[in-house]
Image (cartoon, rainbow, N blue to C red):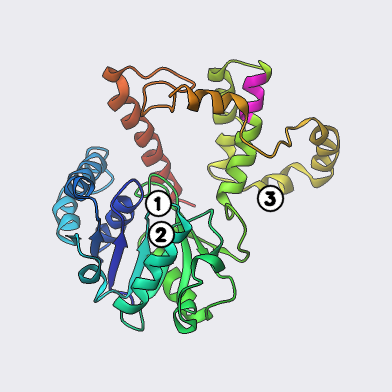
Amino acid sequence: MIRNISVLGAGTMGHGVANVFAMHGYKVSLYESYDNVRESAMEQIKSELEFMVSENYIPIGKVEETLSNITLYSDLAAAVKDADYVIEAVPEDMELKQNLFKKLDVMCPKHTIFASNTSSLPFNEMVALLSDDRKAKTMVCHWYNPAHLLPIAELSFFGNMSEDVFNEVYELYVSAGKQPVKVLKDIPGLIANRMLHALAREVFTLIEMGAAAPEDIDKALKFGPGFRSATTGMLEVADMGGLDVWCAVEDNLFKELNNSNKACEMIREKVNEGKHGLKTGEGFFQYPPEVRDKVRNDFNRRLLTQLKASKQY
């Protein structure tokens, strides 16, 4: 049974992963090698918990309870020595992850299950330096950002592990309030990101075409397909609308859609100009310093509202 969890990396994803497991009563060892990231991690988690209190999602007592379940570490061996489950959220670098797993194979108990938060690196290459026994206890467990608000978790079942081991991790995620997706093929982007970026490619193309202003393109998505998709899957929508209708529309439409195999030049230009979105103050929209906290809180508030509503489905 999984009781002790180690999260490796306390940055954008890792601190949120630790938050979720700790909030659901698990003892979490949070490892971070960079002093500045490690020293700010607990304050960031506390801030996110307090926001959830302010939105009446968790009781105020949950803040200290959650924080008390997390122990910070600067020493990797100490952070994983008693772990039943280890998930890494370090940068997307193949050599880094390979060497990390190789170290963990020596440091961790034989029963420890390993996981990676990656959605883009090939699984077999990532675990190439592991023993065969450990490969049978290693998987991808991909979270969405922000980890403490997005319910999805994509869990790999690529033929290297038993149903029993997979089900143990699946039940862990269910107990932590997640909606696990069982992924059967080791494909780039897994499931959710492939759908996301297929949609994003068309959205960016519509802007480049001048088909509508950025505000109206976002509105069309939020109050059209996105509105329905918050509660209804694509396959269910197709069945509801009639597959004969969908077939006819797609025969007419698909030849007009973007099928490029790289990021659009408009995005590349913005990146080269340092316009990376909220974190730099400009992307498709403007974010002056005085409004950035409000924009971020409004974004998280909408997600939390959806999270509350999703518990009905």
Is label 3 or label 2 in front? 2
Measured Cα–Cα span from mark 3 to mark 2: 38 Å
- The stretch in magenta equals 203-208
Provide the secondary structure element on which disc 1 rests.
loop
Q: Which residue is mark 3?
A: 235
How busy is the neighbourhood of tag 1: few (under 14 within 10 Å), some, or many (20 plus)? few
How busy is the neighbourhood of tag 3: few (under 14 within 10 Å), some, or many (20 plus)? few
Give the percent coordinates (x, y) of residue 70.
19, 60
Name which residue lies at 46% across and 81% down: 131
Is mark 3 in CB contact (under 8 Å) with mark 2? no
Give the percent coordinates (x, y) of residue 132.
49, 82
Give the percent coordinates (x, y) of residue 306.
43, 41
Q: Amino acid at mark 3?
A: Leu
Measured Cα–Cα span from mark 3 to mark 1: 34 Å
Q: Is residue 7 magenta?
A: no
Q: Which residue is mark 2?
A: 96
Q: Which residue is mark 1?
A: 91
